[in-house]
Every structure is written in structure tokens, then in C-alpha cells.
Image (cartoon, rainbow, N blue to C red):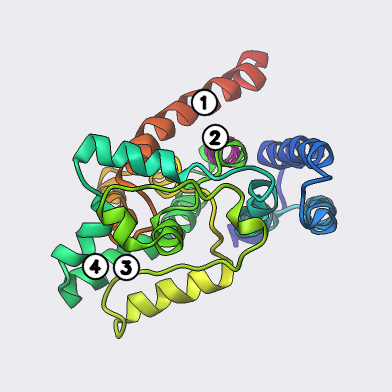
Amino acid sequence: MELFKKDKKIKKGLISMEWVVLAYIVITLVLAFILREDMPNMSRVVSLRIEGISIILALWLAYRCIPCRFMYLVRYCAQLWMLSLWYPDLFEFNCCMPYLDHLIAAWDQSLFGCQPALLFAEKVSSPVFSELMCMGYVSYFFIMASVLLFYFFRRYEELEKMTFIFFTSFFLTYIVFIFVPVCGPQYYYEIVGVDNIAQGTFPDIGRYFLDNTQTQYNPGWKDGFFYKLLVFTHETGERPIAAFPSSHVAITLLMTIFAFKGNRKFGGVILFLFILICLATVYIRAHYAVDVIAGCVFGLFVYMMSWLLWLLLFEMKK
């Protein structure tokens, strides 16, 4: 099989996206050192970065022993899985800074004259629509994996460029999340009280999560399969972080662009899921409406920045 056939040109060094991961590890380790006096769990931050480096080196050695496309796929998939660990790690940084939800909620109020995240699920409470929204939200993981696999099997020669842009965009988003702590409506509304929100009052919660238990609430049809799947994913990895801008929207926009470049029909499917995600993030109260707008703008920005970085580092050297 081509998948297990020995590569004719064995790449001796790391893949470009692995260098991106290492750069993120170094940058955040420096930030953690700076914030160490306020950071609640410095040892966890350090141990995760040791784990990340170990995985990169172990899989690099495995590829050198078995240099085939399958081992390349394992290296890509391992870093895709590691994103689920880098996400909750942001909480350690956000605990060191005051949360900004009172500002983001006020922007929503000024722009829309209400809180869309508060009213959306109340106005459209159909079980069918609830399941559609929950399905759209959890499809985020399917989208990333499917686009990666599409490029691996159908456009292998473009895979490294695609994954470099993808991971660079992702980590640029994570760096923004470190400096812009926003927990999102699912936490903020419950903390300050829905009555305050309905009246247009948005209290400053400061560093609330440094000393308090995390709380969240997702509206929807609680007996639905996709609702339960959503709750499961939140229980395993969700933290009161990363609401502004919406990374779900920003990264799915990137994946939509890549999907259309690969195949128009495939792009159409991802575009449909992208639209669902834009709606679902507000419906389940994961994000304020302005997070979705910011996610679209920021998604295009990080795509362009990552693409230019690829050109500077790799294309212009040829």
C-alpha cells in the first residue's frame, strides 16, 4: 500500500507545523515564567510542555525508523489531538488576569440592543432546532479532522503548507486568548445573574475563577443525542476561557477556505457546517454575538498572516 510504502525522500528534520508547536511552547513558557507568582498551577503548565516536546521527538524518531506516509499522518494527528490539551491550559494564564466579559456583553448590548445569546434559545426552543445547533457545534472536531484527512489522501503535496497555516493560525488565536480573558455567556450569565443581564447590567467579575468553582449552562433540548454529546465534550475539556474572538468560527472559516480549494462539493459541505457553527455558538451561549463577528474577521487575518509567514519561511527560499 502507498500508505506504508517507504518514502523516497526521507525528511530528516521536523515538519514545519511541529516547529510551530515548539515556538508556541517556548513563547508560553516564557509568559508562564513572567506570571509565575500569580499562576495557580505552574507545575501543570511546565509538565504539559515537557509532554508536548516529548511527543514531537518520539514521533520524529518513530518516523526515522519507519519512514512512510502513515507515520507522517500519525505526527499530524498527534498534534491535532494535542490541541485539546493546549485549550484548557489557557485557563492557567487567564486566572492571572481580570476577565473582560462585562465589556464584551456591553458591546453586544450596544450593537444589537439586547443579548442575542440570552434570547436566541428562548425564542427558538424547538427540539429539532436545538439538535441542529448542537450538531453544528460539535461538528467542529469533525471539520478539522476531515479537512486534514482530505488533504492527506487527495492533495498530499499541499498537506504541509495547509497544516502549517492551520496550526499557526490556531496558536495565534490561543495567544490572543491568553491576553484577552473572556469566559462567555454560558459562565458569565450564571455568575452575575440572568436578571442583571436582562436589565442591561454587566458587572465586572475581575479574577473570579481564581477562587471560585467554574459554572456553566447550555440551553437546548436536554434529551437530545447531540445535546448530550455537547455536554460530554464540555465536561471533559471546556473551561471558562477563549470566548473572544470565537475560535470555532475563525478556525472553521479557515477550514472552509481549504475545503473549497481542495474540492467545491466538499467545500459546500464545510460551508454549511460553518454557518451552523456561527449560529450554534450563540444559541448554546458559548459566545456573544460579537464573538462571531470578531471570529470571522480574525479568521481571515490569521489566515493571511500564516500564509505570508509560510511564503517568507519556505516559498522564498526555493
Crowding at dot 1, Cα within 10 Å, few <14 / some 14-19 / many 20+, comes out as some
Residue at which label 3 appears: 134
Q: Secondary structure at mark 2?
A: helix
Which residue is at the front of the view, 99 or 201? 201
Looking at the rendered structure, the kind of residue marked 2 is: Ile
Residues marked 1 and 3 touching at CB (< 8 Å): no
Residue 283 in magenta stretch: no
> x, y percentage for residue 282?
30, 54
Q: Earlier in the sequence, mark 1 or mark 3?
A: 3
Numbered range of the magenta stretch:
161-173
At x 57%, y 72%, the residue is 236
Q: Taking 133 as reference, is 89 left or right?
A: right
User: Any mark on residue 307, and which?
Assistant: 1
Crowding at dot 2, Cα within 10 Å, few <14 / some 14-19 / many 20+, comes out as many
Which residue is at the front of the view, 40 or 272? 40
Residue at which label 4 appears: 132
Where residue 291 sits, quadrant-wise, is top left
Residue at which label 2 appears: 165
Question: Which of pointers 3 and 2 indicates the residue nearer the eye?
Answer: 3
At x 33%, y 81%, the residue is 225
Residues marked 3 and 4 touching at CB (< 8 Å): yes
Looking at the rendered structure, the kind of residue marked 4 is: Leu
Looking at the rendered structure, the kind of residue marked 1 is: Trp
| Cα–Cα span, label 3 and label 2 | 28 Å
* Residue 57 appears in the picture as rendered: yes
Where residue 91 sits, quadrant-wise, is bottom right
